[in-house]
């Protein structure tokens, strides 16, 4: 029997704000900056990169490049994308 494997795209499973919140919460728990950036890119693709580009004033190409697995977005770009996605970053003191 021939099995066909397809590439899994997590963006396809981020159809609700709750799913996005859980996905990003898990990404932040890793404390891995490149993984967090990649996760933001996945969420941006799920929401629509064209819309995010319009809201941030950045080009789609710049967003794809910045939030790829090898990308390194600036804090300014990251915060602009988070704002467009409705994601807030909060700080709490460690217990």
Image (spheres, helix red, strand yellow):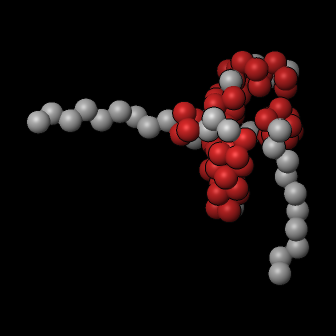
The front one of 50 and 47 is 47
Horizontal arrangement in the rendering, residue 84 relative to residue 15 (left or right): right
Residue at point 64% right, 29% down?
45
Say whether residue 64 is visible: yes
Q: Quadrant of residue 32?
A: bottom right
Residue at point 69% right, 29% down?
47
Q: Where, quadrant-wise, is the C terminus in this rendering?
A: bottom right
Say whether residue 32 is visible: no
Q: Where, quadrant-wise, is the N terminus in this rendering?
A: top left
**From what the image shows, is residue 67 above or below residue 26?**
above
The front one of 28 and 63 is 28
Residue 83 in percent (x, y) is at 86, 37
**From what the image shows, is residue 75 above or below residue 65?**
below
Residue at point 50% right, 35% down?
9
Q: Quadrant of residue 11?
A: top right
Horizontal arrangement in the rendering, residue 74 relative to residue 7 (left or right): right
Residue 55 in percent (x, y) is at 85, 23
Total marks drawn? Answer: 0
> Furthest residue to the left?
1
Residue 60 in percent (x, y) is at 70, 20
Residue at point 64% right, 31% down?
46
**From what the image shows, is residue 48 above or below residue 29?**
above
């Amino acid at each position: 029997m021939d099995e066909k494997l397809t590439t899994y795209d997590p963006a396809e499973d981020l159809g609700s704000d709750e799913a996005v919140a859980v996905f990003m919460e898990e990404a932040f728990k890793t404390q891995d900056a490149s993984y967090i950036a990649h996760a933001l890119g996945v969420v941006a693709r799920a929401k629509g990169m064209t819309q995010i580009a319009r809201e941030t004033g950045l080009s789609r190409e710049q967003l794809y490049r910045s939030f790829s697995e090898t990308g390194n977005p600036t804090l300014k770009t990251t915060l602009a994308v988070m704002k467009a996605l409705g994601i807030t970053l909060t700080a709490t003191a460690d217990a």
